[in-house]
Image (cartoon, rainbow, N blue to C red):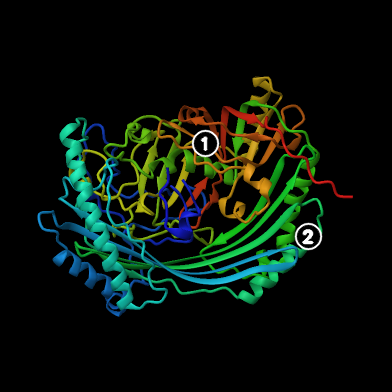
Amino acid sequence: MMPYLPIRERERVSGPFRLPGLAIAFFAFAAALALGKDATAPSRPSEPHVPVDVPGVAIPASGTANKADTTQAGMEASSVLKAMASELKRSMDGLRIKGRPSPYFLSYLLWDVESHHMQASLGSCEMTDDDRQHLVEADLRVGNFEEDNSNFQGGIVFGPRLRLPLPQENDTTLLRLSLWAATDAKYKVAVEQLAQKRAFLANHSGRDGLPDFSRQKVLKRFRAEPRTPPDTARTAALGKDLSRFLAGFPWLLESRVGFQYYYTTFYYVDSEGARFIETVKEHTLLISLFTQAKDGAPLWDYLRVSTRDPLNLGEGSVSFASLKDSLAPILKRLEYLRSAPPLANYRGPVLFNGRAAGELLNKALLAPQGRLREPLGAGSEANFMVSMAGRKLFPSEITVIDTPSLAAWQGRSLFGHYLLDQQGQPAEDIVLVKDGRVKDFFLGKVPVFKAKGHLSNGHWRYGGGFPGVTLLRSSKPLPESDLVARLKTMGSDEGTGYGLVVSKVLDEDAFKLLRHPLASQMAITDGLDGRGSFSLTPPCEVDMLDSRTGKVTPVRGLSFPSIDSKSLRDIVAVGDRPYLHEPQASFSILCPSLLFSLLDLKGSRSTQPRPPYLP
């Protein structure tokens, strides 16, 4: 399952993946750092992978200098980083309990989050809010690199778990006080954890033999993106206009417009000398629509416009007129579905395109890598994805790569672009899947395989293994028209007489705008059990393609049961045009359409409250 973030960020993550706008970019390790892994470990590419054959994608060479990088000056000018470094040194030099081990590693990751939110409904601006938060993650380890207090889940630790608020402003005295209190509490818990872990190991067998932590590169980096705060008056005015327009559709039970802006500065220091400051930002406009079918079933859809670059609200593609045009097919579809009967259980060919294809790749391959190493004492099975190293997961023509060095695509800045991960390691371009076989994983400083050096590939973010910019490609791509023709043929051969096209699945940020009590029936689930299956959130847009006539009809009432990873072998064709899917403002997926020969979808069997009677 995906890593989780603190406070506001935690509310936005679904799997590897939920969170607000955060991302950054740098060079990959050179070929000289190739790992000497054993036969059970995935093979690391000997040099950065450059997917030049992906249409519309040009990836810069690894190691390209960043002209905005002013490392030394940026480090010296930051009073926050100086305060963090001073407090870290004081803790490493003096934090002791007699008879107990002292810390051997300590790092601080500070989030300085500036944000603006707006929500509007029925022609009124219900909320505008500017906020500033400081969040800190402290990683304190006692023991040594081979055996420390981490990677253990068991026993009971009775100790202080202080949750002190950090100062909203960059007051370095208060910041150091907060860091001191948090570090002191963390240390007292850590020594108890290590004692219990050692007691557990003395009475249990089956340890994996891996060290708990590893030494990596020590880097210093500073890179800042300019602040681009939104025009709050224009944001509120557009929200009012759009929500007033949507109020003209009386069959909508709820319609809401939201806007969110984040400017996040990350400060990182650790006891090995690594330092960095990075800034990232997000501008997102959301429109959520909710209604009921005549049998009472909840229906919803949404429009999302999200980018790192400023949105010129009221102009171009985000003008009132353009957004009305974008909403028109969504409204037409919802109104039709209100009267359409629900579709029964389905087994047959399914074509995933648009956002749905990217989300399927997310849940099938990316999200399971959030925690690859199972802690001692957890009592659960090892992560299924690790067992797939070197084995077939997709058809032979499919390759999947992750390229955090890719800064933009078709003129759009990508959320998944970053330079250093949140352990201060350079982001590598890696091959996750080659010719259908799993080749590599998102690795940090916590070893996963018995590999020489246990080197990170710079993909530790938000508490676990995390993607940057993930691209799926096929050596035998098909045009969209051929995919549709093949779906029609397969529907006829299967005996259903039709195939399904899934275009859009649930978006968490848009879903959380809804306040209607019936919206809770559309539950969000991660669906990751670590045993080789995954689940997709309920689809918002599903169409039935008639095999004989080619007619496309919107359908409702379907959801995905748990999908076994073996079903990925049933991908029989891949499109030739990647679609950008960014479910959260922290990573990017470029995935073309995916055609499955056989998948199950289940129809709704639950009873529904009837829609309200309006005279």
**Image position, residue 144 (x, y; %):** 15, 50
Q: Foreground: 529 or 486?
A: 529
Left or right: residue 242 versus residue 127 is: right
**Image position, residue 280 (x, y; %):** 44, 66
Q: Residue at x 27, y 74 (%)?
A: 83
Query: Dot 2 surroundings within 10 Å: few (below 14), some, or many (20 or more)?
Result: some
Q: Is residue 415 visible?
A: no
Circle number at residue 247: 2
Q: CA distance from mark 2 to mark 1?
A: 34 Å
Task: Spot the residue most to the front.
Answer: 158
Q: Foreground: 62 or 137?
A: 137
Kind of element beneath mark 1: loop
- In this picture, is 475 found above or below 218? above
What is the three-letter code of the residue carrying label 1?
Answer: Ser
- In this picture, is 569 found above or below 143? above
**Image position, residue 332 (x, y; %):** 78, 48
Task: Spot the residue most to the right.
Answer: 615
Q: Foreground: 404 or 93?
A: 93
- Find disc 1 in the rendering and name its residue: 535
What is the three-letter code of the residue carrying label 2?
Answer: Ala
Q: Is residue 175 visible?
A: yes
Left or right: residue 560 versus residue 177 is: right
Left or right: residue 446 versus residue 507 is: left
Query: Dot 1 surroundings within 10 Å: few (below 14), some, or many (20 or more)?
Result: some
- In this picture, is 119 found above or below 516? below
Q: Residue at x 33, y 75 (%)?
A: 174
**Image position, residue 107 (x, y; %):** 26, 61
